[in-house]
Amino acid sequence: MEKVVKSGSADFTAKAGKEFAEELIPGSITGLFGNLGSGKTQFVKGVCEYFSVKEVVNSPTFIIKNEHTGTDPVSGSEIKIFHFDLYRISSINELTELGFSELYSDNSVTLIEWAELADEYFRGNINRIYFEYGEKENERIIKFS
């Protein structure tokens, strides 16, 4: 079942991320698909807010991966949030060379921007969220599938 959310601001996009995080379980991997500036990082900020991450959350465009530590509000235990940006990665071989399979765990939530290669790497076994520009300047369409 597909769910569609229309966001009119960066704050609302973050709120959608926070609400989505309520459904995440440790070990989950979510691919974020969409053009530059379509809301992916803002959404990740909301997920991190749900897990009470204290660090500043930015896109890891140049470093590929950010790792944050948060708290699972259900269990109270520590949880890692891995935030990837694969914009600069051009092949599955590069993911393998980076040791991608070792960069997530069962005690983490993994969020991947520009996730086309990750989707292929995991053979489609990831959550997918699509971000699109809306008709108005700050409007974004977020499609969960």
Image (cartoon, rainbow, N blue to C red):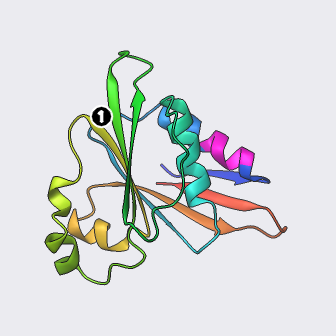
Magenta stretch bounds:
11-16
Label 1, residues with CA under 10 Å away: few <14, some 14-19, many ≥20: some
Q: Give the number of callouts.
A: 1
Q: Note whether 135 is above or below 6 in the view shown.
A: below
Residue 108 relative to residue 8: left or right? left
Q: Residue most toward the bottom?
A: 90
Q: Amino acid at mark 1?
A: Pro
Residue 98 relative to residue 48: left or right? left
Coordinates of residue 81 in the picture (x, y in percent): 38, 42
- The residue beneath circle 1 is 26
Q: In front here: 71 or 26?
A: 71
- Judged from the image, the secondary structure of the residue bearing numbered disc 1 is loop
At x 31%, y 55%, the residue is: 126
Q: Note whether 55 is above or below 114 in the view shown.
A: above
At x 31%, y 43%, the residue is: 28
Coordinates of residue 118 in the picture (x, y in percent): 29, 67
Q: In front here: 54 or 11?
A: 54
Coordinates of residue 127 in the picture (x, y in percent): 38, 52
Prevailing secondary structure of the magenta residues:
helix
Residue 108 relative to residue 96: left or right? right
At x 15%, y 71%, the residue is: 96
Q: Residue most toward the right?
A: 136
Residue 51 relative to residue 35: left or right? left
The stretch drawn in magenta includes residue 30:
no
Coordinates of residue 97 in the picture (x, y in percent): 15, 73
